[in-house]
Amino acid sequence: MEKILEQLYKGELYLYSTFQTTIEDFKMNRDKAFVSYSSFLEKLPDNFKEEFVQLIDTHLDLLPYELEQNFIEGFRIGARMMTEVFQSPISEEPA
């Protein structure tokens, strides 16, 4: 197995496109939201349906930006944690 940095360099590591959430609460709430969305859409007069769909699509287009920022911040926190792991303790007591 290649090292992570080698995979990144070669463009072989792209988890974002293959990510599948396994959190059951997410799946359940996503399904509920879709049913609610569909139900609401059916109640709208025809002249508002397209506008509503565009509004929702515009909102959903923002989600990848939020996910990207959360990933970056999480990665930074992880990197800071690793730097702490490799630092000497502030006060070492003699053994």
Image: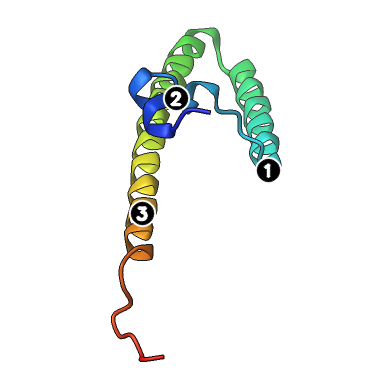
Inspect the image, locate mark 2, and give the three-letter code of the amino acid beneath it: Leu
In the image, is residue 77 above or below residue 35?
Answer: below
| Image quarter of the C terminus | bottom left
In the image, is residue 31 above or below residue 86?
Answer: above
- Where on the picture, by quarter, is residue 30? top right
Residue located farthest toward the front when viewing the structure as drawn: 95
Q: Which residue is mark 2?
A: 13
**What numbered label is drawn on residue 25?**
1
- Labelled pair 3, 1 in contact (Cβ < 8 Å): no
Q: Nearer the viewer, residue 47 or 58?
A: 58
Q: How many marks?
A: 3
In the image, is residue 40 above or below residue 47?
Answer: below
Q: Nearer the viewer, residue 20 or 53?
A: 20
In the image, is residue 3 above or below residue 44?
Answer: below
Position of 50 with respect to 58 (left or right) is: right
Under circle 1, the secondary element is helix
Inspect the image, locate mark 3, and give the three-letter code of the amino acid beneath it: Ile
**What numbered label is drawn on residue 77?**
3
Mark 3 or 1, closer to the camera: 3
> Which residue shows up at 37% across the image and 34% down it?
68
> Which residue shows up at 36% across the image and 90% down it?
93
- Where on the picture, by quarter, is residue 25? top right
Q: Which callout, 3 or 1, points at the residue further toward the start of the chain?
A: 1
Residue 61 x/y as whole percent: 40, 23
Q: Nearer the viewer, residue 65 or 37?
A: 65
Q: Residues within 10 Å of mark 3 (few under 14, many from 20)?
A: few
